Image: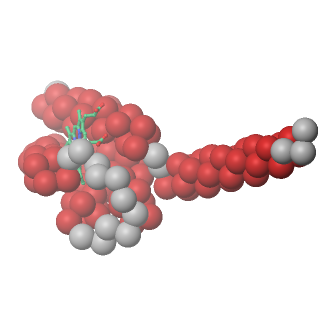
Amino acid sequence: MAGEPQAVSRSIRRAVLILGLGASLLAQATSAGSILEFDVWMQKIDRHSQTILTHLKRHDAPAAVADAKALEHFYGLMERFYEARGEHDDPLLLSYDGRERAAAAARQAAQGDFDGAFESALGIARDCRACHDRFKPIKSL
Ligand code: HEC
């Protein structure tokens, strides 16, 4: 009987600890994107990096610009993800380069410079492996 209140307060303490831990994990996940979200971004990057080439070959400017803007958006999210992890090294630079190239591709396609936009998009596709070879999968910090 004497031990009971102690046991209760212990389990309350544990519950509070778990709640706090959950909240801080959640805050981390929503601030700069979780690893789960990262996979979704990658799937979108994968798709748009292919469809942009098809759209550019067909000289379909609106569709190519939409792809380029999507790539710019998702590379931007990836850039923020690496920035928040404090990885101010190659993965951050590769994300930055990809975002810049996507922005260039959007500008070029909008101006009807399909060859220029194609080169920019190819540059994005060439760098996938540069990042994957060294930084895939994401290491836990
Ligand atoms: C700056 C780094 C970086 C760049 C650039 C990059 N990726 Fe990734 N990619 C990753 C990492 C890291 C993972 C693994 C994520 C994990 O650990 O869950 C990944 C995973 C993937 C996956 C698997 C996703 C899944 O559902 O598991 C695909 C597909 C993918 N990338 C495609 C691409 C394509 C296509 C490009 C280029 C157009 C590209 N990536 C550019 C870092 C990058």
Q: Which of the pair 24/129 is nearer the observer?
A: 24
Image quadrant of residue 99?
Answer: bottom left
Question: Quick one: 94 or 66, which is closer to the camera?
Answer: 94
Q: x and y percent of residue 76 in the render?
A: 38, 55
Can residue 64 be seen by looking at this rendering? no
Q: Position of residue 123 (x, y in %)?
A: 12, 51
Residue beneath the point at 24% across and 45% down: 137
Q: Residue furthest front?
A: 1
For the point 42% across and 38% down, the residue is 36
Residue 102 position within the rendered picture, expressed as x and y whole percent measured from the top left: 27, 51
- Whether residue 117 sits left or right of residue 100 in the image: it is left
Quadrant where the image shows the N terminus = top right
Which of these two is toward me, 87 or 9?
A: 9
Residue 34 seen in the figure? yes
User: Depth check: 105 or 3 in front?
Assistant: 3
Horizontal side of residue 24 vs 40, given as left or right:
right
Position of residue 75 measured from the top left corner of the image (x, y, whole percent): 33, 51
Q: What residue is shown at x 26% (from left), y 30% (from top)?
A: 47
Quarter of the picture containing the C terminus is bottom left
Could you say which quadrant of the image residue 4 lies in? top right
The answer to whether 42 is drawn above or below residue 83 in the figure is: above
Ligand 1, image quadrant it occupies: top left
